[in-house]
Image (spheres, rainbow, N blue to C red):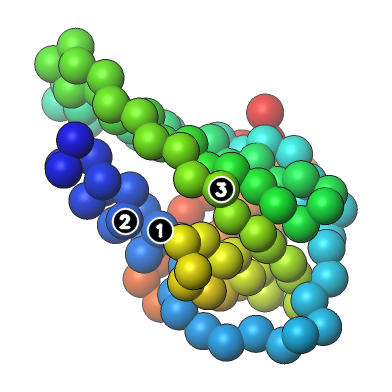
């Protein structure tokens, strides 16, 4: 489970970077819904489901499978947008990243890299 929590933290670090936001955050309804990212390599699989609700709340669920053993974790968050900036507040920390939606693909970019999600 420690490995899973480490991976969840690393995922969040890859998808968002710490920043301050304006108090004028809005809700971009294009983000509302559930988005999935999954990868597998050498018997290790993980998937992340992010659900953005229209009331500015959401959940992130990460599932890790390795050698037939499954670990999962879920966290609630609040969110807002300002232009192409997405701000998520999770566990008392505020994270901000740039995002783009093209069709059913959500691309989140920060200083650590790019994560691409598909709307489900």
Q: Is residue 66 left or right of residue 99?
A: left
Distance of mark 2 from mark 1, alpha carbons? 5 Å
Name the outermost residue toward the front.
92
Q: Nearer the viewer, residue 100 or 94?
A: 94
Q: Nearer the viewer, residue 69 or 14?
A: 69
Within 10 Å of disc 1 (Cα), the crowding (few <14, some 14-19, many 20+) is: some
Name the outermost residue toward the top.
68
Within 10 Å of disc 3 (Cα), the crowding (few <14, some 14-19, many 20+) is: some
Q: Nearer the viewer, residue 85 or 102?
A: 85
Residue ID at (33%, 48%): 8
Q: Secondary structure at mark 1?
A: helix
Q: Secondary structure at mark 2?
A: helix
Residue 52 lies, with reference to residue 15, above or below; the image says: above
Q: Where's the N terminus, which quadrant?
A: top left
- Residue 45 picture location, percent across and down: 28, 27
Q: Where's the C terminus, which quadrant?
A: top right
Within 10 Å of disc 2 (Cα), the crowding (few <14, some 14-19, many 20+) is: few
Sequence-wise, the earlier of marks 2 and 3 is 2
Residue ID at (31%, 56%): 9
The residue that label 1 is drawn on is 12
Distance of mark 2 from mark 3, alpha carbons? 14 Å
Distance of mark 3 from mark 1, alpha carbons? 13 Å
The residue that label 2 is drawn on is 9
- Residue 79 picture location, percent across and down: 68, 62
The residue that label 3 is drawn on is 76
Q: Is residue 63 visible?
A: yes
Q: Nearer the viewer, residue 75 or 31?
A: 75
């Amino acid at each position: 489970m420690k490995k899973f929590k480490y991976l969840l933290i690393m995922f969040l670090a890859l998808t968002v970077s710490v920043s301050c936001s304006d108090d004028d955050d809005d809700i971009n309804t294009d983000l509302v819904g559930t988005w999935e990212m999954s990868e597998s390599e050498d018997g290790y699989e993980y998937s992340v489901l992010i659900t953005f609700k229209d009331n500015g709340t959401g959940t992130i669920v990460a599932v890790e499978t390795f050698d037939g053993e499954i670990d999962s974790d879920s966290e609630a968050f609040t969110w807002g947008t300002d232009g192409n900036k997405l701000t998520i507040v999770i566990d008392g920390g505020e994270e901000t990243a740039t995002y783009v939606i093209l069709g059913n693909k959500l691309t989140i970019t920060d200083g650590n890299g790019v994560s691409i999600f598909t709307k489900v």
